Image: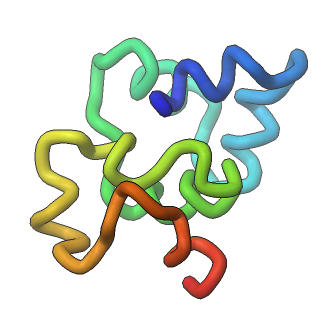
Amino acid sequence: MKLSEYLNQQERGGKAALARKIGAHTPDLSDWIAGNRPIPVKYCLLIERETGGAVTRADCRPNDWQAYWPDFNPLTTQEVSHG
């Protein structure tokens, strides 16, 4: 699921809450959602964990996730619970 789709399903203030949980700024999330900037690698696992696996690292970096997490299988979120 795209980060934008996940945040659209959250209650008001969801974007700010997620930003706090992952240590990012709310405008950063806005830029990532709009496609103005890619999601930095350092936030991908945090997003995956804080969304309960709804948004995976592969969702965050669809074009290059294999370079960072070659053993990750995006068809499961099993690594999230063990991570």
Q: Is 80 on the left or on the right of 64, as rendered?
A: right
Q: Is 76 on the left or on the right of 82, as rendered?
A: left
Q: Position of residue 11 (x, y in %)?
A: 88, 20
Residue in the foreground of this view, choosing between 45 and 16: 45
Answer above or below: position of 15 versus 49.
above
The residue furthest front is 75
Residue in the foreground of this view, choosing between 50 and 22: 50
Q: Kindly indicate the quadrant of the structure image that contains residue 26.
A: top right
Residue at point 72%, 42% (across, down): 18
Q: Position of residue 82 (x, y in %)?
A: 60, 86
Q: Position of residue 78 (x, y in %)?
A: 54, 74
Q: Position of residue 83 (x, y in %)?
A: 56, 84
Residue at point 74%, 54% (across, down): 21
Answer above or below: position of 3 versus 63.
above
Residue at point 54%, 21% (across, down): 4
What is the total number of numbered labels drawn onto the structure image?
Answer: 0
Q: Is 9 on the left or on the right of 25, as rendered?
A: right
Residue at point 57%, 72% (across, down): 80
Residue in the foreground of this view, choosing between 20 and 3: 3
Q: Kindly indicate the quadrant of the structure image that contains residue 27.
A: top right
Q: Is 36 on the left or on the right of 77, as rendered?
A: left
